[in-house]
Amino acid sequence: MVFDFLGHIGSVRPVDFAQSFYLHYPKVAIGNWPPMFYATLAIWFLMFGVSRVSALTFIAVVAAATATVIYSVGRRLLSPFAGLFAATLYVALPLVQESSARIMTEHLVTLLILLSALQFARFVETRKALDALVFGVVATAAILTRGSAWSLLLVPPVVIAFTCNWRLLLSWQLWVGGLPVILLCVPWYVLTRDMSKGAMVGIDPNAHMSFFMDAIVAFPIFVVQAVGLILSALAAIGLWITLVVHGGKRSTYWAALAAIMIGILFIQTVVPASIEPRFMVQLLPSFLLFSAAGGQWLIGKLPLNNEAGFVLWLGTAAVITFMIFDIPDHMRNSGYERVSSALVTSTQNLTNPAVLLASDSIGEGSVIAAIAATDNRPRMVVLRGSKILISEDWLGRNPRDHFGSLDELRKFLDSIPVEAVMVDEAINPQWHRAYHKLLAQLLHTDTRTWSLEGTYEVIRNGKTKPDSVSVFIRQRSPGSPPPYATDMRLVSKLMQRD
């Protein structure tokens, strides 16, 4: 959407453009997530084109950039071997691999949080207003990428406390860093505070303490599960050595890295969002650098020359990688591009045809993304069954069906009119809704109106589902008048009724 808008700057109001785009391709959640990720990826698309491969490459490049920063920090604070150890293990971790298979904010916000915290450590050393301002700018970019980056508010107090730089609180330069956050982040989050309520529901929106107790146990376990016991033990040693035993100038950077972990754990346990392992990617760079510090201390106790030390570092990294590395095949979802191609081809002679998707978030999102990437935007009008045929919250709870009979559903499809329908039977049982069965029954029995274009095999979460997705096309007799245009006012009304 942002990529397309960049070609229309000055000719249309941003809100009008966004609303129109959403009615055609309803898989946009600006407000629930801030704009930085969208803007950055749109600029990437300008350079490398819009495609699934291009988007995944962007995520891989950002992950590699984070690994590069980890190596640079490890090399400066420890040794080149230690930096390479931490960077290599970062890209090998299954949790990082899984996040690299998603077009989501985890990697970009992780990189920006890491850079911001390190920049604050630099400011503590230099006491220059420019360094404080750069910290504020990078922190602003992180917060405008994902709300969890508000954890950076804890970096200054934690670093000051660890390093006992209490006089820094009286320095005007320190407060310069807060200006970009106040001027840009606060207004955005105030304006969009009502847009993300549906996602900030946790386990029970009325029991924050219950969520906190669950989260404070779950997230540390997720971290240990992600890195394994060896790296966890090394990190514990590294924390002790860098923050307790050793002091001096270098401890500022270690305090900043510790502040990242404290801040992420704090915000993820206090803010009642969902409890998922992927949220812990943001603290893994710090965790692995502390693991490298623990390894450096242990190796330093052995009578080894540089060559032997290198072999030991390499061997340790190889053993740990062998134990933890896993290609996340269970993240694989494919086959939907063929479904989207069938929908596009079957309606290619129509001006702005409406197609209806009956699936879950994976099926709907996969098809919408594939159509939007190849469609002559904006042409097709994609309708999500989960938004049009039912009402439910952001996490799919409390569903309320809008149609209770075949006749009501038939009249609805004719009123739009819907020209093609995808029925996805590969979805998990928990996402089955009454409208899935009602719609399938209508399409299979009303053969005068609907014909089966074909069935398609898809792969969901790494498992093959043969002939599980069906595409139905509205039949029109030869010589009949062309269909009237999709009723966009009706579509808009239906999308906004809740």
Image (cartoon, rainbow, N blue to C red):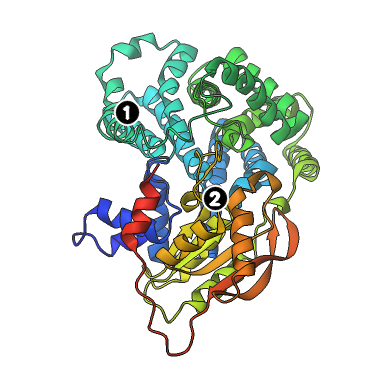
The answer to whether 337 appears left or right of 174 in the picture is right
Residue 87 % position (x, y): 62, 42
Corner quadrant of residue 222: top right
Given residues 230 and 32, the one toward you in this image is: 32
Q: Which residue sits at x=71%, y=29%?
A: 224
Identify which residue is drawn at 75% across, 36% down. 305
Residue at the farthest left position: 10
Residue 162, placed above or below residue 413: above
User: Quadrant where the N terminus lies?
Assistant: bottom left
Task: Tell me where residue 332 appears, x and y as whole percent.
Answer: 67, 56
Front disc: 1 or 2: 2
Residue denoted by label 1: 132
Residue 254 spot, x, y in % from top left: 53, 24
Q: Quadrant of residue 217?
A: top right
Say which element carries label 1.
Answer: helix
The image's mark for residue 404 is: 2
Amino acid beneath label 2 = Gly
Residue type pointed to by label 1: Ala
Q: Residue at x 29, y 60 (%)?
A: 6
Q: Toward the viewer: 88 or 4?
A: 4
Image quadrant containing the C terminus? top left
Please rate how many residues cluster around mark 1, counting C-alpha atoms within 10 Å: few if below 14, some from 14 to 19, many from 20: many
Q: Residues within 10 Å of mark 2 (few under 14, many from 20)?
A: few
- Comparing 281 with 84, the one in front is 281
Residue contact at pointers 1 and 2, CB within 8 angstroms: no
Looking at the image, residue 393 sits to the left or right of residue 19; the answer is right
- Placement of 194 over or under 367, stated as above or below: above
The residue drawn where x is 50% and y is 61% is 368
* Distance Cα–Cα, label 1 vs label 2: 60 Å
Residue 295 in percent (x, y) is at 71, 29
